[in-house]
Image: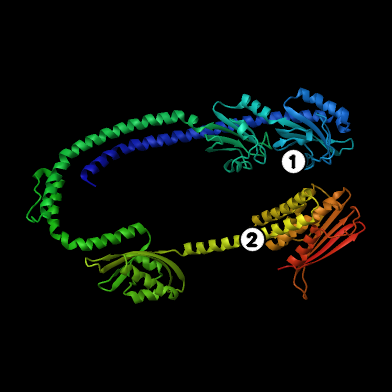
Amino acid sequence: MTLTRRLLLLALISVLPALVIWAFTEVSLRRAREAEISELVIRQATLVASEVGHIFDGVHSLLLAMDENPSIRSFDMPACNAYLRSVHQKVPHIIAFVVLDLDGAVRCNDRGFINADLRFRDRPYFQESITKRAFAIGTYTAEFTEAGLGAYSVIPLSLPIWGEDGHIIGVIAAAMDLRWLDRELKERVLAAGGSLTLADRNGIILSREPYPDRFIGTKMPEEFSSRLSAGDTGSFTGKSLDGTNRIYGFIPVGRPPAEDIYVSAGLSSKVAFATINEAAKRGFLLIAAALVLALSLSWLASRAFITKPFEIMTNAVRDWRRGDYQARIDLPRNSGELGLLAKAFNDLMDDVAERQEALKASEERARLALEAGHMGTWWYDHRKRMGGWSNQAAVLLGLPVSQSLNNVQEWKSIVYPDDAERVLEKLRAAVLGNGNYEDEYRVRRPDGTVRWIGSRGKVSFDSRKRPAFFVGIIQDITERRQADEQQRFFLDELNHRVKNTLATVQSIASQTLRSSKSPAQFKDSFEGRLLALSMTHNLLTLKSWREADLHDLIEQELAPYKREADERVALCGPKVNLPPRYVINLGLVLHELVTNAAKYGALSIPTGRLDLSWAVVESEDRPAHLSIRWAETGGAQMQPPKRQGFGSRLIRRSIESELNGTMTLTFGPSGVSYDISIPLP
């Protein structure tokens, strides 16, 4: 770097404190503004959630009042239809009212549209109202078939209907118009230039401003949907669905006042930081003007006090290059430091040629060492047939710092025997080629440990293109090689598990299709078995696919049919951790058993009872095995089927073929029972 440039750099450094202060102030202002905006958008989201909560509370109160009407409780269709129609006329934001019995059949609605062949027990709002025994907020529904509506975006709100005996006899549901909800929130709580998003617990957008028509009914992007189940309210910055960068405040699902709805409110980052950006721009322009002035003055000073003396010095150097070795740099006496530099140049020229070659090698070693950081260096002199390494290189190789490499044979003795010849061949190729060298190999330390080494180097050649000096670096790469091996292992393991899962799914699909009488039956059966396989995979994933507890597997399969304090199902057994293959097969078996019990057995009627017990049995004459007993009582009397369906074949194949176990099926007068025995690994 020239002295003129150094002077300019000094002027630049003098302005640096102002730049630092400006940057610090800018960062402080932005952080304060970010905190202010974050608090603002969270308050805005809370306001929206409160407004939505008030709206839902109003519908809840309306359904409570309607539930008291005798025509609804008695399912008196003409009177009930007329009553729902009269209420609908007074509540225009509710698109439809519908009353369903416990089987999910529509008993009356405000449109008088009744299709006795349809059942709606699988509706999320219906299941939630029955399970929670309370008011429930459903999920986005594109077509409310219960009321005979066409394609119309609604969100169902439902309440259980209680009979005179204190038991639930049905569900009354109201379908809220999402377009009305969007307009209502826009008029009441949407800030100027802001955005608003409501989504159900599945991440489907219920209300969106701006551009509601583009986004209502669509899935939230992955970067937004991760906040659906966040633990608490918060804020974040991101790009909106319409491409605008915004700061968002959000309230996740499960937080009051709208517990089943995700709410977010956003403010444009450009609008939020407009005043700060303008002030920052003005401050930057002032500092830039001061910098230009300082650089201009520095350049003028350098012309007078630096450039002219350097012209005298460069002229002398030019004369030396032309062969005038008597030329000297002659500066005035008041030249100060430049005069001392001129004298040093005059003395230096006598030693330049002698030290040039040694300086070149030294600079090359220093450059490689600096680039390598904490890596060790090594070198080899071809003319002397001798070499050595740095202290750090000796430490990497597990050798004493005082020990130095003498020749190629000593180096070969350190290299792992299987790699020695290949390492020497690489070194020879670098010497005989373009001089570039790079290799990875193993070394054996004196303590017996084997380490992987990465080495790079460069060969220097003399004027006759003969190798003169070989210099390089080494680095311990053992951890990286181990990580690569582990990654390959995990990829092979993942490939194996994916193939097994796909084969299982293919077999289930083929066998289910073969035993299904209709596409609808195939769909229900296949989806149920696929869901059971998926839930089992989720259970294994929580334990990194090492094992899973049998009790957790059973609870998972019985969860859709077992209520709190339900005495119909009794479980008894110790903690048993099973490997993945056992978990997957038993998950399919339990799914088939639970499904059969819910359709035809003990779980299909209120008086039925299921006793499920298991134990680990050990004996001297046989290995430990898992004994499972499934006993249904109090249900409908079942007779042995005339033909064996796929579910029965799946149970028997999973136990006997896949797990090498045995199974005994008994059709008793009070229910069916299974006795299963499986050898443990």
Q: Which residue is mark 1?
A: 124
Tell me if 218 is positioned left or right of 38 in this view: right
| Residue 490 vertical placement versus 182 (above, below) | below
Q: Secondary structure at mark 1?
A: helix
Q: Amino acid at mark 1?
A: Pro
Residue placed under numbered mark 2 in the picture: 499
Q: Position of residue 314 (x, y in %)?
A: 14, 48
- In percent of width and height, residue 229 lies at 64, 43
Q: Is residue 121 above or below residue 656?
A: above
Categorize mark 1 by other alpha carbons within 10 Å: few (<14), some (14-19), many (20+).
some
Name the spot of residue 326 as percent of width and height, x first.
6, 55
Q: Position of residue 553 (x, y in %)?
A: 73, 56
Check the image and tell me how it is coloured.
rainbow
Looking at the image, which is closer to me, 421 or 34?
421
Tags 2 and 1 in contact by the CB under 8 Å rule? no
Residue under the point 12% across and 54% down:
321
State how far apart marks 2 and 1 are (Cα). Answer: 34 Å
Q: Amino acid at mark 2?
A: Lys
Judging depth in this view, the residue of 502 and 59 nearest the camera is 502
Which of these two is toward me, 32 or 118? Answer: 118
